[in-house]
Image (spheres, coloured by chain):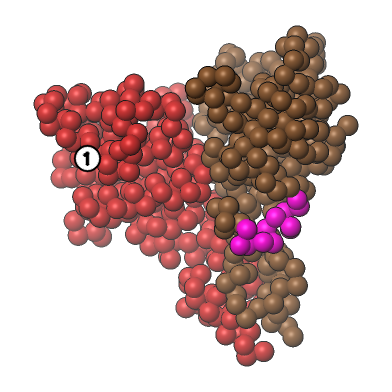
Amino acid sequence: MPIKFENVSYTYSPDTPLAKKGLDKVNFELKDGTFNAIIGHTGSGKSTLMQHFNALLKPTNGQIEIAGMTITADTPNKNLKNLRRHVSLVFQFPEMQLFENTVLEDIAFGPKNFGYDKEKALTSAKYWLKKVGLPEEIGGRSPFELSGGQMRRVAIAGVMAYEPDILCLDEPAAGLDPLARKQMMALFSEYQKEGHTVILVTHNMDDVADYADNVLVMEHGKLIKEDSPKEIFKDRKWLQEHHLEEPKSSLFAAKLTNFKFKKLPLTIDELITGIEKNLKR
Amino acid sequence: MATDSIIKIKNVSFSYPESDKPAIDNISFEVERGSWTSIIGHNGSGKSTIIRLINGLLVPDEKENSLIEVDGIKLNDDTVWDIRDKVGVVFQNPDNQFVGATVADDVAFGLENRGVPHEQMVKTVAEAIKAVGMSEYANSEPANLSGGQKQRVAIAGILAIRPKIIVLDEATSMLDPEGRDKILKIVRQMKDEYNLTVISITHDIDEANMADQVLVMNDGKLITEGSTKTVFSQVELLKKLGLDVPFFEQIKAKLLNDSMKIPASVDSEKELINFLCQLNSKM
């Protein structure tokens, strides 16, 4: 079932002098099993939007259909646990939410919380520990003895271990080294290809070009554009007007002034192919 | 080596307790006064450990001939506080380094600690906040600022104590591209104005590229060092270490790999673009 936002608005501190619009009449539909990127400035409403996917925030107006539920301003908190089993949110710095005695116990906490028996939770924890690229032997160590990058992986494994249908990630790779970043992005991409929906908030336009099927552009709480990366990055002038960066490959292509690219290269391989085609005439 | 070295590290090793492998393995390097040095390496390669050794938060393994010298002072138990006055560190997560209830209080913290008279403190704080472009937020609560603004306040707090060296420990990694550019611009201005020495630990290749000198770390060892051009042209080595290379070097490597002939003198993005455009006009 697709995720559907209908006229969703959210106001922080409504009816007070501090009232501030977080989301303003947002409409979109995300297909199952797609990789979606949300881009936009700091303060554009990306994180506010993210928090609506599992009803940490509920719309002030409008409604959301997600994972078989309809969320409105009046939705009681009572039934949200089931929603959160299907839709999980990874915040920035997820490593700050680690708390168990051992790495494996920490990863197994989510599955246990959502009804896995102890053994099954542990099996899942072991599987995901490996999946996020951590060696088996750290499973018994305290998560607080690990490096920052390792802690991040443990936290992400903990969310993936109960295999939510919809995985929402807020800048999950920020602060990781380039190799770890690539591994993480490959992990999310693989998870999507296995049939899950991935929603990623990011500032990294190369990741958008490499992985996303669909891009949502936020500005001042409004959804100002929704399209494929190809269409989003096509209009250079529009990107500049909205202070958005471009993928490195299309930027480089633009500097090759006497080259003609049939289609705008968004990834390095497309760029290389394009350059070689020009030189082969 | 450097003619006027503000930092001298010689034969320094460090092992965390209960670890059989040293986190820093017999490292030596120097940093020239007023220069910009980038340290790159994957997570856990020892980059941050070096900084903690330089400002005495960690004590190196006992070894003969090992030396850490900052601004002409040899680091030991008696000098550690003098050295910490000279080295200011901006960390990755701005939320972890706030103590004050307002921006101005927070910037004043380091001065209060050092017993600076109130009158002078007020002046210094205002100057430091102005230098990072945050004057209109002097009385704001740090919690209400954006990540980039928080990092600017953190830098102001460091500028206020007039260090000789400012260390950016992945200080821009959580910021959006605009926030990052602004921080780097401010640091560059401060560097020029106060003749600061900058050390930046970063995964961001563009940030690393701003340096005069690049140090590459792997598993506690200093693998290579040199100018950005010398270091970043070693594409294979950097890839092997899991590090990024500047974008134009990636393109160049791929084109060379497809047997295009590119002269060795093409060693910047601009030259690569010129070279390709010329080649194309000859076709």
Say few, some or many: other residues with alpha carbon within 10 Å of mark 1 (under 14 / 14 to 19 / 20 or more).
some
Q: Is residue B240 visible?
A: no
B104 left or right of B182? left
Up the image or down, A65 lies above or below B267; here it is: above
A197 left or right of B17? right
Image quarter for residue B252? bottom right
- In which quadrant is the C terminus of chain B drawn? bottom right
Q: Which residue is mark 1?
A: B127
Up the image or down, A91 lies above or below A252; here it is: above
Task: Spot the red chain and give its letter.
Answer: B
B114 left or right of B254? left
**Residue placed at 67% from the left, 46% from the top?**
A224
Task: Spot the brown chain and give its letter.
Answer: A
B255 left or right of B101? right
Q: Give the total number of marks visible in the rendering.
A: 1
- In which quadrant is the N terminus of chain B drawn? bottom left
- Chain bearing tag 1 is B
Which residues, given as a range, are shown in magenta?
A: A227-238
User: Which is more toward the observer, B93 or A58?
Assistant: A58
Image quarter for residue A81? top right
- In the rendered image, the residue lying farthest to the right is A1
**Residue placed at 86% from the left, 23% from the top?**
A68
Residue A12 lies, in percent from the top left, at: 58, 24
Residue B61 lies, in percent from the top left, at: 32, 32
Q: Is residue B133 visible?
A: yes
User: Which is more toward the observer, B161 or B60?
Assistant: B161
Which amino acid lies under the numbered mark 1 shown in the image of this protein? Answer: Glu
User: Which is more toward the observer, B106 or A217?
Assistant: A217
Does dot 1 land on a helix, a strand or a loop? Answer: helix
Residue A173 lies, in percent from the top left, at: 60, 39
Is residue B235 highlighted in magenta? no
